[in-house]
Image: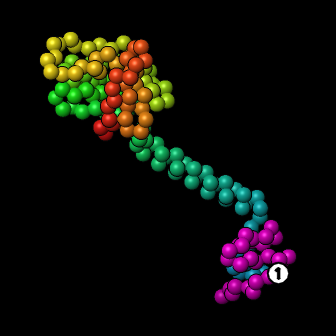
Amino acid sequence: MARRPERETEDGACPRPDEVLPARATALHCLFGPSAPRVSSGAMNRTRLAALTAILALGLALTACTPQGGGVPGKWGSTDPGEPNLIINANGSYSGSDGCNTMKGTGTISGNTIDLGTVAATQKVCNGVDTWMSTAASGKVDGNVMTVYDSSGARIGTIDRDD
């Protein structure tokens, strides 16, 4: 059975648990003493590189599967009668309603903004409904709120994320 060696001096290596290993020490040396198995630096570097690559790959995979709040694609607004809403896809295509008229189109997403481009919409008479969304030209997302602007750049309203 291997025993833990006594602590060596500064020039010899094995630090206290709260210290960093000196250049000449290895974790195996500090745990098992002189009988510790030797690992070549090339093999150690390849092992470290493989471990780091695996960790990064796992991180990227988890990031790709995790919904990222604050992005433009998603469901916005409410589907309650008289309320504006939009469903925006990652490719910029969208559909929704100003609360009365349906609308759809394909916009351009850049970062946290969308330029709605040409909007195709029905033109029903909408008594008692504020159809401000029918003049929307662009939107900018901040967290879970999209601020909507008309073609002159004036702020015309906000809609909340609903997904």
Please provide the residue range marked out in magenta: 1-27
What x and y, as percent, mark residue 19?
72, 73
Q: Dividing the picture into quarters, in which one does residue 144 lie?
A: top left
Crowding at dot 1, Cα within 10 Å, few <14 / some 14-19 / many 20+, comes out as: few
> Which of 54 and 10 lies nearest the eye of the viewer?
10
Q: Is residue 113 magenta?
A: no
Quadrant in which the C terminus is drawn: top left
Q: Which residue is the extreme one toward the right?
A: 11
What x and y, as percent, mark residue 71?
43, 35
Does the image show residue 91?
no
Q: Is residue 13 magenta?
A: yes
Residue occupied by mark 1: 9
Q: Is residue 111 left or right of residue 4?
A: left
Does the image show residue 135?
yes
Q: Dividing the picture into quarters, in which one does residue 27 lie?
A: bottom right
Image point 43% across, 35% down: which residue? 142
Q: Is residue 83 left or right of residue 154?
A: left
Query: Compared to 104, does 66 lie above or below?
Result: below
Query: Compared to 72, does 2 lie above or below?
Result: below
Image point 49% across, 30% down: which residue? 111
Q: Dividing the picture into quarters, in which one does residue 24 lie?
A: bottom right
Q: Is residue 64 left or right of residue 78?
A: right
Image point 45% across, 27% down: which residue? 113
Magenta portion: prevailing SS class: loop
What x and y, as percent, mark residue 8?
80, 82
